[in-house]
Amino acid sequence: MGGFVCIRSYDPLDLIPLIFPDGKELFFVLATPEYEAPTKKMRAALPAEVGMAHHVWNSSQAGALVAAVLQGDLPGLGRALSSDKIVEPRRAPLIPGMDAVKKAAIEAGAFGCTISGAGPPRWQ
């Protein structure tokens, strides 16, 4: 399928292709440093419970990300990608240099930067 795909459900599998507007170019950079990020350690860093305000915020950013893809809104895509209030604030401190990488990515022209999965790869 390729491109952007929204997964509505895993069981049964329900995929929604999101078509990025013609004439717009978008590139992702995946940086994988020489750093071990054990999944067990990264999962343990997550909160046992998520407050309603943070849940609502992250859900709204998921919607904003989909809207940005459909509209070809690159700055909006970057803002939505970079605005996690649940996972990244807990995991980023465990990844050496994450703050510096995020700052450098934005200064170099990236619209956003975030951790992918348990880390350490970063989408920029």
Image (spheres, rainbow, N blue to C red):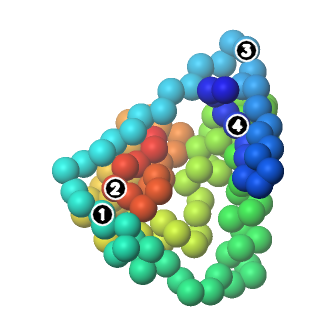
> Mark 4 and mark 1 in contact (Cβ < 8 Å)?
no
| Residue at the image position 19 percent from the left and 50 percent from the top | 34
Of tags 1 and 3, which is closer to the observer?
A: 1
Percent x, y of residue 39: 37, 67
How many angstroms separate mark 2 from mark 4 (CA)?
23 Å
Numbered circle sitting on residue 120: 2
Residue marked by disc 4: 5
Q: Is residue 111 above or below residue 94?
A: above
Amino acid residing under circle 3: Asp
User: At label 4, which amino acid type do we have?
Assistant: Val
Q: Secondary structure at mark 2?
A: loop
Looking at the rendered image, the quarter that the N terminus falls into is top right
Which one is nearer the viewer's eye here, 118 or 57? 118
Residue 107 visible in rendering:
no
Disc on res. 22? 3
Mark 4 burial class by Cα count in 10 Å: few <14, some 14-19, many 20+: few
- State the CA–CA distance, disc 3 to disc 2: 32 Å
The earlier-in-sequence mark between 1 and 4 is 4
Question: Which numbered disc, 1 or 2, marks the residue that appears first in the sequence?
Answer: 1
* First in sequence: mark 1 vs mark 3: 3
Residue 21: percent from the left, percent from the top?
75, 21
Instruction: Tell me where residue 72 sits by quadrant.
Output: top right
Query: Do tag 1 and tag 2 residues touch (Cβ < 8 Å)?
Result: yes
Question: Alpha carbon of mark 1 to alpha carbon of mark 2: how far?
Answer: 6 Å
